[in-house]
Image (cartoon, rainbow, N blue to C red):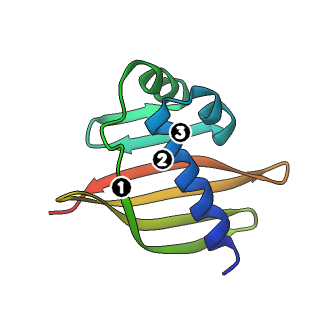
Amino acid sequence: MNDLLPVLLDLEKQAWKAADLRDVAFYRDYLAPEALVVSPWGILDREGLLRDLAENPNEFPKYAIADPKVVPLGEGSAVLVYTVSFGEQRLFVSSVYVQDRGRWKAAFHQRTPAL
């Protein structure tokens, strides 16, 4: 499963870039049908996230990811965890990925502000 880290981290970086660009088409393909996102602003399902992405600018266009780790959750699923920094602000992030027809899809994403 160590080979999962670069694969999932690359997907995560693509997602941050797509959020910055408001690339709804990327997210339609990237998200699993049952996807949920939990952030300090609330809980969004897949359609809510797509709508939010189209209507609101990304509040974190520049970021740095540190200390990424992957935990396998079973056959065809894993969680990626890391710290992301935006200037002085830090968040702890977790993203759950599931395989769908041989492709990794984001099923869950959570951002927790560091205190």
Name the image quarter holding the N terminus.
bottom right
Give the spatial CA distance, label 2 vs label 1: 9 Å
Q: Are marks 2 and 1 in contact (CB under 8 Å)?
A: yes
Residue 97 figure quarter: bottom right
What residue does disc 1 label?
A: 63
Along the viewing direction, whichever of 16 and 102 lies nearer the viewer:
16
Is the residue under label 3 in contact with that under label 2 (CB below 8 Å)?
A: yes
Q: Amino acid at mark 1?
A: Tyr
Q: Position of residue 60 (x, y in %)?
A: 32, 44
Q: Say which residue label 3 marks.
A: 18
Residue at the image point whose x is 51% and y is 56% from the top: 95
Q: Horizontal and vertical percent for residue 93?
A: 39, 59
Residue at point 64% right, 28% down? 25
Along the line of sight, the residue nearer the viewer: 18 or 103: 18
Element under label 2? helix
Which of the 4 image quadrants contains residue 112?
bottom left
Three-letter amino acid code at the position of disc 2: Trp
Q: Is residue 93 left or right of residue 26?
A: left
Q: Residue at x 47, y 29 (%)?
A: 49
The residue identified by callout 2 is 16
Q: Residue 96, located in which quarter of the rendered image? A: bottom right
Q: Amino acid at mark 3?
A: Ala
